Amino acid sequence: MPFHLVSHPVAQDALVALRDSATRATDFRGLAYRIGLIVAAEATRDLASAEVSIRTPLETTTGRVISGDIVAVAVLRAGLSLIEPVLALLPQARLGHIGLRRDERTAQASCYSSHLPMGISHSTILLVDPMLATGGSAIMAIDLLKEAGARSIRLLCVVAAPEGVEAVQRAHPDVGVYSPALDRELNTQNYIAPGLGDFGDRLYGTGVGHDRSQEA
Ligand code: PRP
Ligand code: URA
């Protein structure tokens, strides 16, 4: 499965403001939503559909409806930001959550919770996690999904590092990766450069430098 660079100008435009260190959480959420819509649209271009007959007020005609089961799975916390845009396009999607935490020193991911819908072996899984850095979190999430029976998985990101894309492709060559950005590299702390910093902290206003409680 190739890496899919989502070059849509609306996503690229929102990405500029998302990367900007001056952008605060309130705007960051809206920008992530906008990018999520475009990435989700690109990642679902080839979903299976079936012909149906419909009666308009004038006559009977045909159309196509999405025919398969869709499951959107968020990697907590940051992946939650991409669930609403996926549901805006696919309100029928079932939802799952995988809680992963990346150790700040070693960048090793560890799992603290996993709640997946039953019977996902014939479903199309949209795994959403905005940052693909070393790839450790994505690989762990895909491992868990495959253990639960998943066979068709697409990974939707906002910013990817070449190291992460390569690691996912090596571990799970059947998983398509969709992202509007393929950045230069990981830095020595395993952050994506140029990147946008810590997505979860910027989304929720947590972490060092996010205490605005004393501001007027
Ligand atoms: C971030 C991000 C990914 C992970 C990517 O999550 O949302 O899950 O790091 O890094 P990797 O490719 O090197 O594994 P983080 O662990 O910071 O948790 P958070 O979403 O709760 O902030
Ligand atoms: N997680 C983030 O939120 N940002 C990075 O650059 C790497 C991992």
Image (spheres, grey):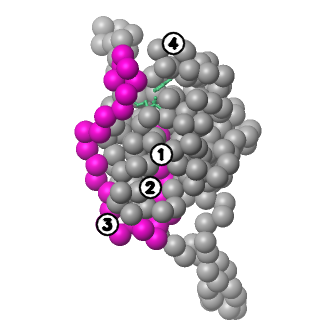
Mark 4 or 3 closer to N-term? Answer: 3
For label 4, count other residues whose C-alpha is less than 10 Å away and answer few (under 14), some (14-19) or many (20+).
few
Residue 119 sits inside the magenta stretch: yes
Give the CA distance from mark 4 to mark 3: 40 Å
Does ligand 2 reach within 8 Å of label 4's beta carbon? no
Mark 2 or 4 closer to N-term? Answer: 2
Q: Are marks 4 and 3 in contact (CB under 8 Å)?
A: no
For label 2, count other residues whose C-alpha is less than 10 Å away and answer few (under 14), some (14-19) or many (20+).
many
**Residue 22 horizontal side relative to residue 96, left or right:** right
Mark 3 highlights which residue? Answer: 118
Picture coordinates of residue 158, whole percent (x, y): 57, 36
Mark 1 highlights which residue? Answer: 128
**Residue 4 horizontal side relative to residue 196, left or right:** right
Q: Which residue occupies the extreme left position in the image?
A: 112
Mark 2 or 3 closer to N-term? Answer: 2
- The residue at the point 67 percent across, 80 percent down is 63
Mark 4 highlights which residue? Answer: 188
Give the CA distance from mark 2 to mark 3: 13 Å
Up the image or down, 186 lies above or below 174; here it is: above
- The residue at the point 48 percent across, 45 percent down is 128
**Residue 178 horizontal side relative to residue 85, left or right:** right
Q: Quadrant of the C terminus?
A: top left
Give the CA distance from mark 1 to mark 4: 25 Å
**Residue 136 horizontal side relative to residue 118, left or right:** right
Q: Are marks 1 and 2 in contact (CB under 8 Å)?
A: yes
Q: Are marks 2 and 3 in contact (CB under 8 Å)?
A: no
Picture coordinates of residue 213, whole percent (x, y): 30, 13
The amino acid pointed to by label 3 is: Met
Res. 146 image quadrant: bottom left
Q: Which residues are magenta?
A: 103-129
Mark 2 highlights which residue? Answer: 72
The amino acid pointed to by label 2 is: Ala
